[in-house]
Amino acid sequence: MHRLLRTRVLIPCGVALLVLSGCLGSTPPTQFYLVPPLSAPDTPPPASAGRRDLTLGVGPVTIPPYLDRPQIVTRTSRAKLALADFDQWAGPLSDTIPRVLAENLSLLVPTERVILHPWPRTIDPDYQVTVDVQQFDRGPGNQVVLAARWSLLDRDGKELVLRTSRINQAASGADYEATVTAMGQALDTLAQDIATTLRGMAQPAPRANEGTIKPTRSAYKGVGAR
């Protein structure tokens, strides 16, 4: 009788263990992702478009709290977010965004002297770019949205430019690799906007008398001709 009861107890326990082991074995592995930086352009900007001895400081770069987590966040509606438990960032997004922007700006300005915030007090950058990311996720329709306010400061910390960029980048699919790739492309676009503004500001000042249009002889005709 005792042997029969023991058998009846062991059989359900064995079945439960098999089911549990099957569930554990079916858990998908966690995938880790990095936002890709801009690859070296085939035709880099001409030397006159920037100053290679220019020192550019990048940061601080701030992100909203909902993005400050290992899981990749997507937006299923305007008010609802989804967290991917098995698709995560390989490093904090708060570190990845400034690093990618710095790499992109180094190619686009171009300059090899790009430093990340915080930098030593002994370094005094010619310009500093600060970025406040307000939205950075994939929404319905596989559209990645990057909304950010950014500013350029001079060596004395004076704000020279303050702008808001809203970038929509279509992802090639709904999977997370396509999402992360599109996020990298959105950061490329933001870096291009910043680099274009910075290149214009970094142009050398015109020499005296440059830009002065000398009147031609025909211009004098008719002036005081009477």
Image (cartoon, rainbow, N blue to C red):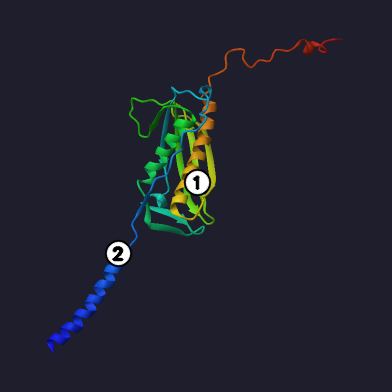
Task: Tell me: residue 30, above or below residue 215.
Answer: below
Within 10 Å of disc 1 (Cα), the crowding (few <14, some 14-19, many 20+) is many
Residue 39 badge: none
Q: Nearer the viewer, mark 1 or mark 2?
A: 2
The residue tagged 1 is: 146
Residue 186 placement (x, y as % from top left): 50, 43
Q: Is residue 66 left or right of residue 216?
A: left
Residue 95: x %, y % from top left: 37, 42
Q: Residue at x 51, y 51 (%)?
A: 172
Q: Which residue is mark 2?
A: 25
Q: Mark 2, residues whose alpha carbon is within 10 Å: few (<14), some, or many (≥20)?
A: few
Which image quarter holds the C terminus? top right
Image spot of residue 15 (x, y percent): 25, 76
Count of numbered circles in the view: 2
Relative depth, front residue between 201 and 3: 3
Is 222 located above or below residue 59 in the figure?
above
Q: Quadrant of the N terminus?
A: bottom left
